[in-house]
Each structure stands twice: as C-alpha cells, then as structure tokens.
Amino acid sequence: MSEKITWRENRIIVPEEPIIPFIEGDGTGPDIWRAAVRVFDAAVRISSGGKRKIEWLEVLAGEKAKNLTGDWLPEATIESFREHRIGIKGPLTTPVGGGHRSLNVALRRILDLYVCLRPVSYYPGVPSPVKEPQLVDMVVFRENTEDVYAGLELKSGTPEAARLIEFCEKEFGWRIRPDSGVGMKPISRAGSERLIRAAIRYAVAHKRTSVTFVHKGNIQKFTEGAFTEWGYDLARREFGEQTVRWNETRENETRIVIQDTIADIFLQQILTRPRNFDVIATMNLNGDYLSDALAAQVGGIGIAPGANINDESGYAIFEATHGTAPKYAGKNVINPSSVILSGKMMFEYMGWLEAAELIEHGLKETIARGTVTYDFARLTRGATEVSTSAFADHVIENMTL
Ligand code: NAP
C-alpha cells in the first residue's frame, strides 16, 4: 500500500511504496518525463526484486496548470510537496522582462529550499569542449533564497521606484538616475551560514578535499565579502577539527581546506586547473552562472542534474537544470539525462542507493557505447543518434549491477 514519506528526528523515513509528486514541466518537459519515469520504475523494480514501487502523483505548475486551473502555481501543488516531503520536476517557462515571476524561484522560496545542489562530473564518451573533462569533479552548493534572486525589484518609472530612489539619495547620498529600475541584494549572515554549513557537512560526509567560497567580495564588500568572512568564521567555529584555512595548511594535509576565490578568476581557473576545486559554496547569481559553465565542461546542461533541498526540514525537489527548450517540444529528441540523473540524486536522498547505482550504471554504459540523443550525436563521430524514448530503453537495458 502506498504511503507518504515522513520526517522524524531529522531523518527522512521512506516507506516501501512512497507517493512522490511530480511536475511534468513545460515545452520538452513531457518528453523527458515520459522517458525518465520508465527508467526510475525499472531501477526500483530491479534493485528491490519487485518489493518497492513508487506511486507517482502528478501535480500542476506552469502552462498546464494555467490552462487547467487558471493559476501558474496552484496552492494545491505547494501543499502536495509539503505533504509528501520530496518531489521531482521538469523545466518551467519563465518570461523575460514582464509576465509572471519564475515558478522555480517561487517554489524554492515558499518551501525554503535553501540549497541548490548541483554535482558536476564527467561520464566517459560525453562530448566536451575541454581536453581533460575527467578532471572536473565538483559539487556546487548555491544559495537559493537570497541575493538578487530574492525578487526585490521595482520597475523603472513607477512611483515606488521613484520613492526608493529619493529615499536613498536623502538618507545615504546615493545618486541613482531617476529612470532606473532598482533591485536589492540581501545577503544575511543566517542565510549564508546555513548554506555554508550544508556544504562543509557534505564535504566531511563524502571525504572531499576542499570547500571554496566563490564571491565578488572585492567589489560587493558587505554582501559577497561578508558571505566569505562568515564562511571562514563558521568553518573555524563549527568544524575546527575537520577543516583548515588555506593559509594554515601543513605538509600532507588531511583536513578539508577552506579557501575562497573571486568569481571572475574562478571562471578562468575551472578551465585551466579544475583539479584545484572540489566542493563550491556560493550565492545565488554566481551559482547560476558557474553551474552552467561547469556543466558545459562535462557535456552541457542536457546531462546536468540538480536538487533543491532544505536539510533542516527534509523538503527537497529534484529537477532538470535546463530550461524548456521549446523548439524541440513534442519531438521526442531531447536528452533526458538531466532529469534521469536528478532522479538518481533523489534515490540517494531517499537512501535507495541500489536504484541510484543502477541508473548511473545504465546511463554510463549507454553513453559509453555511443548511443546518444541529437545533442551529443552532433559532436561525436561514429555515434548512433536515438530518440528520447529510445535512449531511455537503452538505459534500462544496460541496468545490470
Ligand atoms: P533551455 O530551455 O535550457 O534551452 C537552451 C538550449 O540548450 C536548447 O535550445 C538546446 O540547445 C539546449 N538544451 C536544453 N536542454 C536540453 C536537453 N535536455 N537536451 C539537449 N539540449 C538541450 O534555455 P532557454 O532557451 O534559455 O530557456 C527556455 C525557457 O526555460 C525559459 O522560459 C526559461 O526561463 C526556462 N528555464 C527554466 C528552468 C527550470 O525550470 N529550472 C531553467 C532554465 C530556463 P540546441 O538548440 O543547441 O540544441
């Protein structure tokens, strides 16, 4: 009988037949979901010998929700994620400039999913623009609820923007052109510390070698600079035994090195010496840019998974990191690897490690044999191009432990 996942004593409790809500997504969302869900079901069935099964519960968001309910993000969807604790989603459309605000950002904020977790590593056979993509093995912790993504923006020409501009001039002597749109970038100590704590805990649990704070603290001293200082303080205070600041390391250091780097040089060094970086902790906007840049080094957003997590409440939503790729919608050609690997992360979070391993193995094997969707086929000599659904068939066929 299917049951809800629950949270007790800071642990997720997963029944043998959990109910998991999913959002299919806009554009190519339905194409990748149809393929991925077959992979998930097969992995669970094979790894548990038929003892476990997921009951998938569709919840609405995006264009489908707007058409069926009149709402882009119905309250029932948010309630369902709250009730079932974890969920998975495809991409959702966000208009640029006007229109509704990002539904992804809204979901992350409403459920306070403050960690955006994006592991980036290389699968042999994936076409890459760099010479040694296998050297990229990083895990990005991107803060999800603050920074310029907090949605504190006023439109140019509105009375609200004019009032804020006037207030800033009167109170702080800040001269802002009157026809400006204005936004705010809050970075709090509490928000920074919980994100950095999650990153260091992960580094300790997974025996990683370093945690790097990526920031623009040289320019934005009281936001991005403060994030970094709070990070060093927290590492010393809460992880004094397990970590060491970069300038205090000893020969043959075994502790986790805490270091920082400015965002612009970081984007150069992930290309020139990716070996230097392991776990990354950063704010929202930097994290957005750098996780796509890193994904490009190992094959692009078509294969980059992601999760949004609050490890204090157990809420988590796993998601494809790419957008809706609308020009391919309904064509059954898009690469479903991003959502498939997000499902693998979900199984790890649930403690269903055998299912996660099966998915990884099936996907790795399929790509290594040169059976790939159009995006990889156009960059790989001798590859066999297959559709989204056929790619999923191959992943399932290649699932052997
Ligand atoms: P996009 O949908 O990610 O697509 C950009 C390009 O990336 C595609 O044209 C395609 O490149 C490639 N691509 C993306 N996903 C792929 C996949 N699964 N397999 C193979 N190639 C893939 O980005 P966008 O065009 O900037 O955004 C479209 C909409 O998605 C916007 O409304 C945006 O706000 C939204 N969005 C949503 C999320 C989310 O829900 N988390 C994230 C990002 C963007 P080629 O054309 O070269 O083949």
Image (cartoon, rainbow, N blue to C red):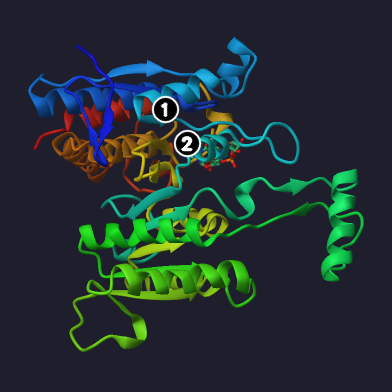
Q: Which residue is mark 1?
A: 82
Residue at horizontal 75%, vertical 36%? 98
Q: Which mark is residue 164?
A: none
Q: Which residue is mark 2?
A: 111
Q: Where, quadrant-wise, is the N terminus in this rendering?
A: top left
* Label 1 secondary element: helix
Q: Can residue 373 be seen at all in this image of the molecule?
A: no
Q: Can residue 252 be seen at all in this image of the molecule?
A: yes
- For ligand 1, which image quadrant applies? top right
Q: Determine the CA span between mark 1 and mark 2.
A: 7 Å
Pick whichever of labels 1 and 2 is earlier in the sequence.
1
Q: Is label 1 in contact with label 2 (beta carbons under 8 Å)?
A: yes
* Label 2 secondary element: loop
Residue 239 position within the rendered picture, expressed as x and y whole percent measured from the top left: 28, 69
The residue lying toward the viewer, choosing from 140 and 393, is 140
Question: Would you place residue 348 above or below residue 167 in this image?
Answer: above
Q: Is residue 114 left or right of residue 384?
A: right
What's the amino acid at mark 1? Arg
Q: Is residue 305 left or right of residue 174?
A: left
Residue at horizontal 44%, vertical 75%? 260
Label 2 crowding class (10 Å Cα cut-off): few <14, some 14-19, many 20+? many
Residue 95 position within the rendered picture, expressed as x and y whole percent measured from the top left: 68, 35
Question: Would you place residue 99 above or below residue 293 in this image?
Answer: above
The residue lying toward the viewer, choosing from 289 and 327, is 289
Q: Is residue 58 left or right of residue 222?
A: left
